[in-house]
Image (cartoon, rainbow, N blue to C red):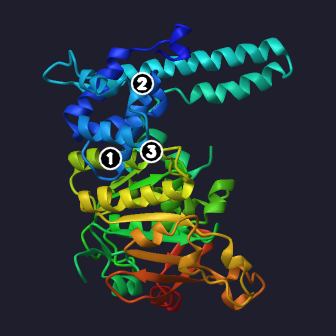
Amino acid sequence: MADLALERGLPANLDAERFVLGAVLQDDSCFPSVASELKLEDFSLEKHRRIFLRMVDLHERGERIDRVTVANELTKHRQLESVDGVLYLVSLDDGLPELVSFESYVQIVRDKAVLRQLAFTGQRMTDAALQQQESAYEIAARFGEELAGFKGRGRSELESVGDTIENEGLSSFITPSGRDGVPTGYTALDQMTGGLQRGELAVLAARPSMGKTALALNISANIAFGCNGHREPGDEPGSVAIFSLEMSKRSLILRLACARARVDSQKQRAGFLNHGEKARLSRALQDISGAPLFIDDSASTVIDIHHKIGRLRADHGELDLVVIDYLGLIGAHAESESRTRQLGIMTSYLKTRVAKELHVPVLLLSQLSRAPEKRAEHDHRPILSDLRESGDIEQDADLVAFLFREEMYKPDAAHLAGTAELIVAKNRNGPTGSIDLVWLREFTKFENPAAWAGERGA
């Protein structure tokens, strides 16, 4: 039976929903593309939502999606009868053209879902206006942001840094309105790990404000500019895709540029750069404009990330690094699972379906629990058990490194200012240990100690 929304005459296209599911049953290689565009609630019928969710479960476990496996999965969850049985699964592709253009059906399903959401939002806005419990401005502000979220839903794609800078304009950034590994540019880390390895999942974790995003961007810049950590030409530049679930493209580009130009990012935000600093920042923006860096700030699930990486590789060739910032903000398709189980599914998917399948190192950022702050005053260094919410993170990761700055706990200790440690707590194919780094707070940049000492001596 149709859901209540359909009984009320809201927009839906049941044939398009059937054809999307039927196309996946015919060829499950199209599922990442479907799942990156559609959410569970985009299907208007409850039985279609249940079938789609079971497809998600199968895909995340790396299993085939076909009539038999979906029927079996529905049976396990005691839902086969609720979707009208195997006969309905068989009927999903009835009338489906032999040469399927499933993208058009996906577009129809998504558009109808947005129309339904707009109708619901409009009704709630009307109710709020009639109740007169808020001012007109408050109602407009509350619903204006929600309505703005529908614009171009699912269409924001990976964009090169050069395109973003060209679209925003240079001035807007300057004035406010070993093994076959990929070298990180940090000498001791590369010696310990042989670089970030293709097909492997590396986790960089820290407590908030330690600088994990800054370090990930520094590594990305070192790879994209072909630097060896001493700011001299080294290896050939590599391609890097950054998926930011916390910061916007613009904010990340500014961080990259300020670090490269060695410009105080706080002064830039406040609009206090002098002529020389503006010139350096302009040159840095032009440099990164031509770098093979790609940033996406709209991905929401691991399947979405997987699909977008696949499309980027098809357009630009093999990638040398994928950065995801950060694990705790990635959404889950299977909302019925516990958060711990969800995180385990995500890390396993990133390891097997992204890193291994696409032959690329994945650097996944993660938060740590509060445990380091609860330990004795002299021992705040993180350990593997501090990884937040899921032991699966440690299990799936080939490399786990913790970023630690003791000055955060002892702000009055002058000798700790600017010191940092990268603690390699797990290294599946090499040694573990602690690596010293220099933290240049004003540039949001980490340096090799030897390079920094040589620079200061010069």
Number of the label disc, if any, that sits on residue 309: none
Horizontal and vertical percent position of residue 185: 38, 77
The residue most toward the right is: 133
Horizontal and vertical percent position of residue 189: 40, 83
**Other-residue count near label 3 (Cα within 10 Å), few / some / many at <14 / 14–19 / ≥20:** many
Look at label 1 and name its amino acid. His
Q: Please, is residue 412 above or below residue 175 in the view?
A: below
Q: Please, is residue 136 above or below residue 392 in the view?
A: above
The residue most toward the top is: 9
Residue 66 in view in this figure: no
Q: Quadrant of residue 400?
A: bottom left
Q: Quadrant of residue 227?
A: bottom left
Residue identified by numbered label 2 = 110
Residue at the (53%, 43%) spot, across then down: 335
Left or right of residue 352, residue 301 in this image:
right
Q: Please, is residue 229 above or below residue 111 in the view?
A: below
Horizontal and vertical percent position of residue 443: 57, 69
| Label 3 to label 1: alpha-carbon separation | 18 Å
Residue identified by numbered label 3 = 299
Number of the label disc, if any, that sits on residue 59: 1
Decide which of tag 3 and tag 1 comes sooner along the chain.
1
Residue at the (58%, 67%) spot, across then down: 388
Q: Secondary structure at mark 3?
A: loop
